[in-house]
Image (tube, rainbow, N blue to C red):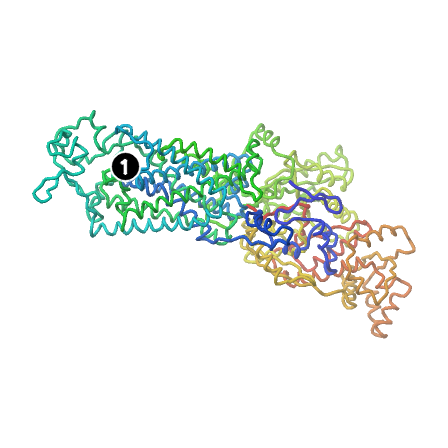
Amino acid sequence: MCYVSTGDGVPKENSPFINNTDNDKGNSYDGTNLALFEEEMDSNPMVSSLLNKLANYTNLTQGAQEHEEADDDEGAKKKAVKSPQMGTFMGVYLPCLQNILGVILFLRLTWIVGTAGILESLAIVCLCCSCTMLTAISMSAIATNGVVPAGGSYYMISRSLGPEFGGAVGLCFYLGTTFAGSMYILGTIEILLTYIVPKAAIFVAERKEDEVDALLNNMRVYGTCCLALMSVVVFVGVKYVNKLALVFLACVILSIIAIYAGVIKTIFEPPDFPCLKTVDIGNVTVTTKLWKLFCDGPELNATCNDYFVQNNLTEVQGIPGLASGVISDNLWSEYGPLGMLVENKKLQSIGEGDSSQDIYMPYVVNDITTFFTLLVGIYFPSVTGIMAGSNRSATWKGEDFIQGFPLPFLNRAPDITCVILFGGCIEGVLLRDKFGDAVKGNLVIGTLSWPSPWVIVIGSFFSCCGAGLQSLTGAPRLLQAIARDGIVPFLQVFGHGKANGEPTWALLLTAGICEIGILIASLDAVAPILSMFFLMCYLFVNLACAVQTLLRTPNWRPRFNYYHWAEKEWGDGIRGLSLNAARYALIRLEEAPPHTKNWRPQLLVLLNVDSDQGVKHPRLLSLTTQLKAGKGLTIAGNVLEGTYLTKDAEAKKAEQNIKSAMSAERTKGFCHVVVSSNLRDGVSHLIQSAGLGGMKHNTVLMAWPGNWRQSNDQQSWKNFIETVRETTATHHALLVAKNVDSFPTNQERLGEGTIDVWWVVHDGGMLMLLPFLLRQHKVWRKCKMRIFTVAQMDDNSIQMKKDLQVFLYHLRLDAEVEVVEMIQSITDESRSSIRRKNQGAAPSTELSTQSSAAEDTHEDEAQLIHDRNTASHAALNDKADAGPDRVHMTWTKDKLFTERNRNRECNANVAVRDMFNMKPEWESLNQSNVRRMHTAVKMNEVVVNKSQGAHLVLLNMPGPPRNRGGDENYMEFLEVLLEGLNRVLLVRGGGREVITIYS
């Protein structure tokens, strides 16, 4: 975690979405209308400043284009580069389509259908698609749970499950992507040597039994050369890979269209395959190519295979078409061992062939032993293309991704239809002919297509080339991301690259691992390895989503809501952990502050008890329960004044009553009663020492001291202010509930209404997080969230509203936004209203004053200047002991009426001066107090006008004055600020971010 030091020496965590600097703080406060919050402005930015930075935020790192511009225009002012943004079709659907419709569809799907049958083939497709669909849904939830940085699936997993899981899963994903490159390259070479230029083979088998070894050796040689060529292309020009992607994809789409066109053509005109021993040309009998395969010469008297001679040829239409009814013959599986003849067992034959001679005959045999799970492993890589869209997360348009990410599941429509169409058009024997030996060495799916088999051959070739280049482009960047995270120490060297960030060393390692797959040389052997890596990756993607859902962390707010089907709550998980498990967990739990994404309110609730040790404000516990959607820690604390020896029984009774109240309010947590010689020290001890190890509170919840004006005991409100200072010093957040007894119980159900948030200064985001947590509870579920922010004289309120809406979208919060303008300065009228406010609201309030040398003509100008170094506070401290210079003015109702009558009898200006005769003039009042009271009055007017009917109002809580002589004024300011509001929750952040736009 990175920290910067604020002006008062308090460390403050960097925001995950804004870089706080001293320069930013210098511009954080420009007006006088928010003087009540000027203490906060020294360390926290104004909302307008925050939103302006958020509007210009980008999650992209410097890329190749920026580096090229830097090289071309060295020393010149670099122009801002706007990264290209891709929508649903270009950014999500097409990358997935290119990876899914590839080598398996063109080279192995017909063989899978012929071997497993239509029914089991559909089961394989549906099984793999179900796995993919569940993962796609989970990834949609994770990806829409904040901004996903460039890095795709690895960042989703590692930032959700933590670095340990993230590193392991990231390596699985990397190895899967690398072996995918091997598979695509092997597919490219198989198409090249088998169907395009068979004569280019370097190794030629002299005997039939050596053909497999020769093919594998050719695959190794040509595959290595192809890998080297692709690596050079990726190293030199990545931009060309992206430009060629659309060309390759166009070839794939044309190939798919050609398949469907060929299927339609078979209904009317099935393709013809002549299958005869001899043909008559004129009056001459001529042997065919088939004769030459089974005989030792073209002559009619040549020696031929006995089985060939004894049986007449039966001409079987290899592709009879959809109308032939062959679909019924292809419903069931035809698994077999290695070397078994591929034959139609329904046709009768005379005699048995000599199995010892079969290996020399041009029969089609199984090259591997086939079974169901093997076919699943071979087919599964064709559904792994869903990760291709997430790997381009840096170029998504957010709203398009939500709509488009589940769409790749629709890519399975071609596979499902192809399974049915292949089984309904092609004879089963031909389907099981993996390399098309029975159709003159052509690709079986190409023979079906129209207008020419070459459409499929060329399309599949470019498809494999493009997918291989994409794998070699994505895998090194994935390894670079893992290396830069420092999870696996020995991989850190691969985090470096060229000056423009290209992963040179990672590309070399990727090419080396990819070569291992090429040396295996068999596509059927590499595909299951690839499946294992991706299955492990998919497992942890779904696990990440499940863990976040079950833990219900506050940061888990995906905009994609359809990631589970639970109709009821599952409860709080496993209960009754043993002592050893609890001890082990506490030891492992770090005492350092949690990451922003994992922050949740751990509450210390300060309760008061009456003379019978009963809880005074049980609704405070109700509010605690309603906030527990964050699933955090709860400690209910109370302080008894006295000594433990004399208060032992009362302490136990108070603890029992608090536990009973917690049980009644369904508040799950702990109780902590402290006996101290005075309340102030006891509360301080609670705040400092409550909790154990890493299980400590980070938020203090307390009730507003009601009727503090009428109370004869000033210690109550003084203890309140000291508690505020304590929480600030310990960097805890503070929640103060005013009129807490009017808060709803857990049994109430509030109707449609609003929770209004008044966001004045940004102090970590608690104002945003708390309404979200409350709305998770059934009491507040129907309430809508409204956010009000304050615009100053120099702010563009329209732009502020737009920026705030964008900010809330990235935070995944659904709320109405309104910007309120407060641009009125302090005039003579407003000063009079402030004076009347103090007279009416606080009959016995004392305002501390000091002499001022400011001229009347400069008064308004002086009041509009904000002293950033809080000189007024320093002046108060310096003159605190100067008795003659410090005068107290007491305002009463009688004096108010007297002065009002005097105003009616004489000129207003003279009367005002007479009223303050022999006393400090109003103009010489402490200007800081005047500004603060002005802010309280104006803010109260605006808040009451907008939010008086709200179910709950959340406000920034101003900090207490540094000089304790102004404590009573501080209470008056808050009282005026909250006047006329029913339920209010004052919020004061703890100095660190608690909410983030990141996933």
Res. 658 in view: no
Residue under numbered circle 1: 115
Quarter occupied by the C terminus: top right
Quarter of the figure with residue 376: top left
Q: Compared to 222, does 776 lie above or below?
A: below
Left or right relative to 726: residue 170? left
Query: For the view shown, which residue lies furthest in the top direction?
Result: 356
Graded by Cα atoms within 10 Å as few (under 14), some (14 to 19) or many (20 or more), the crowding at tag 1 reads: many
Mark 1 residue type: Thr
Left or right relative to 972: residue 239? left
In front here: 954 or 207?
A: 207
Query: For the view shown, which residue lies furthest in the left direction?
Result: 283
- Residue 419: x, y in percent? 30, 44
Quarter of the figure with residue 1: top right
In front here: 880 or 498?
A: 498
Q: Residue at x 57, y 38 (%)?
A: 496
- Residue 606: x, y in percent? 68, 43
Left or right relative to 599: residue 209? left
Numbered-mark total: 1
Q: Compared to 751, does 201 lie above or below?
A: above
In front here: 148 or 867?
A: 148
Classify mark 1: helix, strand or loop: helix
- Residue 13: x, y in percent? 67, 44
Res. 196 in view: yes
- Residue 345: x, y in percent? 18, 34
